[in-house]
Image (cartoon, grey):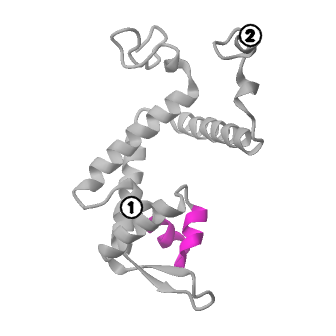
Amino acid sequence: MSEHNQPSIETGPNGEIHPEAAQAVGYLANHAARAFNRLVDAQLRSHGLTLALIGPLLLLKWKGEMLQRDLVRLSAVKQPAMVALLDKLEAAGMVSRTTSLKDKRAATVHLTDKGNDAATLGRRVLLDVNAHGAVGFSDAERDLLVTLLTRLILNFEQTMEHNITRDVFMREGDIHGPSHTRNRR
């Protein structure tokens, strides 16, 4: 704990991260996500599952059967990776794919009973790991964190939607900023 009773990550030459990174919200959010992912994967491993595999299962349990392309659209997974995930899930008997009656080129993905059980387990693991991450938080602190992280996500997504280039972020004097470019011949 630091002098103001705030948690801190060890920084400096022998620390875990660079001192500037320890104050960067994007880095800290990413660091938290990686720690979360490792914990979830560790809990799922003994069941032959991973965080990546339970994603489509949870989506199918929530939304019901859907076209494979809709699974891609509703998830953060690109088409080739989704095909690989569905191949693994189908081989494990957790999903089945059938040709769509409306479009013979499309596949409808169905959750099997085994997949439903895996989705239930995955949901429980996600909730447990999230609860562990919030140990020591008051309800108000947890709600504030959710609000702030949601704002952070929206800020990053808005930046991407507006196709803002890296030049917008460069300040005078940055190593690759305007002054660097101006001095090049």
Q: Position of residue 36 (x, y in %)?
A: 40, 42
Question: What type of secondary structure mainly makes up the magenta span?
Answer: helix
Q: Which residues are magenta?
A: 57-74
Q: Nearer the viewer, residue 70 or 23?
A: 70
Q: Secondary structure at mark 2?
A: helix
At horizontal 46% and vertical 39% (from top left) the residue drawn is 33
Q: Secondary structure at mark 1?
A: helix
Label of residue 53 in the image: 1
Task: Say if the magenta span includes residue 92.
Answer: no
* Residue to which mark 2 is pinned: 179
Q: Which residue type carries mark 1?
A: Leu
- Left or right: 185 as drawn, with respect to 111: right
| In this view, 75 is above or below 17 | below
Q: Position of residue 8 (x, y in %)?
A: 43, 18
Crowdedness near tag 2: few (<14), some (14–19) or many (≥20) residues, C-alpha within 10 Å: some
- For the residues labelled 1 and 2, say whether their Cβ atoms are less than 8 Å apart: no
At horizontal 49% and vertical 62% (from top left) the residue drawn is 80
Q: Is residue 123 visible?
A: no
Q: Position of residue 78 (x, y in %)?
A: 54, 58
Label of residue 43 in the image: none
Which residue ends up furthest to the front in the rendered image?
Answer: 185
Q: Nearer the viewer, residue 174 or 56?
A: 174
| In this view, 6 is above or below 108 | above
Task: Say if the magenta span includes residue 63.
Answer: yes
Q: Which residue type carries mark 2?
A: Ser
Q: Quadrant of the C terminus?
A: top right
> Which is more N-terminal, label 2 or label 1?
1
